[in-house]
Image (cartoon, rainbow, N blue to C red):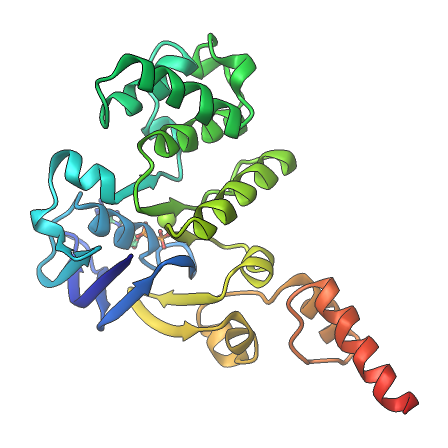
Amino acid sequence: MSIEINKLHFAYPDSDFALQLPTLKLAAGLTAIVGQNGAGKSTLFKLLLGLQPMQAGTITINGTSGEQLVGSARLHQIGMLFQNPDDQLFNATVAKEVAWSARQITKDRTEVDQIVQKTLAQVELQDLAAANPFDLSLSDRKLLAFATLLATNPQSYLLDEPMIALDWHSQAIVLRIVKELAQAGHQIIVSTHDMDLVAANFGRVITFDHGKMLFDGAPTDLFAAPAIMEQAGLLPPQIMQICAQLGDTNVYLTPDDYVSKHQTAQLQTQH
Ligand SMILES: Nc1ncnc2c1ncn2[C@@H]1O[C@H](COP(=O)(O)OP(=O)(O)O)[C@@H](O)[C@H]1O
Ligand SMILES: [Mg+2]
């Protein structure tokens, strides 16, 4: 499972913004894309999804050229959770919303019903199956939009700011599902501002600034490069911010990481 981007160039008409990427291969598992508002994260996702034509370059999705991926073949390969769930929801009930998506990949009614039950249970919205999506809280609407994507179960998932507007419990649900998908061999690319999320869960982080790639590597290496963090307008994980105020400028990904590094250091001084 992989997405390959080769020398991509894209500019919106009547705008100074241009997205310019080198050759980039995104493998299975979890990849985070970070950067300030306007850095080009959503634009990349729209290009990967085929919503916009590029001016130059190529995109290959799981072995097939993006341009050749059409109809249900595309749905099986790649799908996106939009930042704003209201861009994705339009059916009369929660269950119909998921069923509509499921019907894009199967016409078998029993199968559609099974997908609806399974995905609503995954996001814990089964008790709201008969509700109107627009009577749901923003957090639940976002979970429902995620359920519609799970219903088509693409090989590659693009999640655009999936945690924004989610309450704490819903964030835990999404994180659990994302980890399960990655374990099952799916590719998950997440755009986010949340460095604590990246630090705790991601092995690879790609940093955008004004449409260009500034960094591609492990979160530890990004957080160890203050000049890149500053240029990209990113704050390090909270544990690093607290430690920096206390004069400790080492890299710590999470509170657990801090504790284990200090326990190791203590053991070393005791021996
Ligand atoms: N439809 C559009 N037409 C013109 N400019 C756009 C359009 N969509 C986004 N932009 C501009 O492209 C740049 C990148 O936006 P975007 O990809 O949404 O960034 P991000 O998701 O990182 O916040 C911004 O300057 C934004 O104003
Ligand atoms: Mg965006």
Give the residue displayed 36% in from the left and 28% down from the top: 148
| Residue 59 x, y percent position in the rendering | 16, 59
Left or right of 252: which side holds 235? left
57 lies left or right of 171: left
Q: Is residue 211 left or right of residue 258?
A: left
Q: Position of residue 210 (x, y in %)?
A: 32, 65
Residue 146: x %, y % from top left = 42, 33
Image quarter in which the N terminus is found: bottom left
In this view, which residue lies farthest toward the right? 270
* Residue 203 vs residue 208, the one in the foreground: 203
> In the figure, residue 258 lies in which quadrant?
bottom right
Tell me what residue is drawn at x 37 percent, y 26 percent.
86
Q: Quadrant of the C terminus?
A: bottom right
- Please determine whether, in this image, residue 255 is positioned above or below residue 117: below
Tell me the residue at 16%/34% (across/down). Answer: 72
Q: Is residue 228 above or below residue 269?
A: above
List x then y, in percent, for residue 225.
Answer: 52, 80
Q: What residue is shown at x 39% (from left), y 19% (from top)?
A: 114
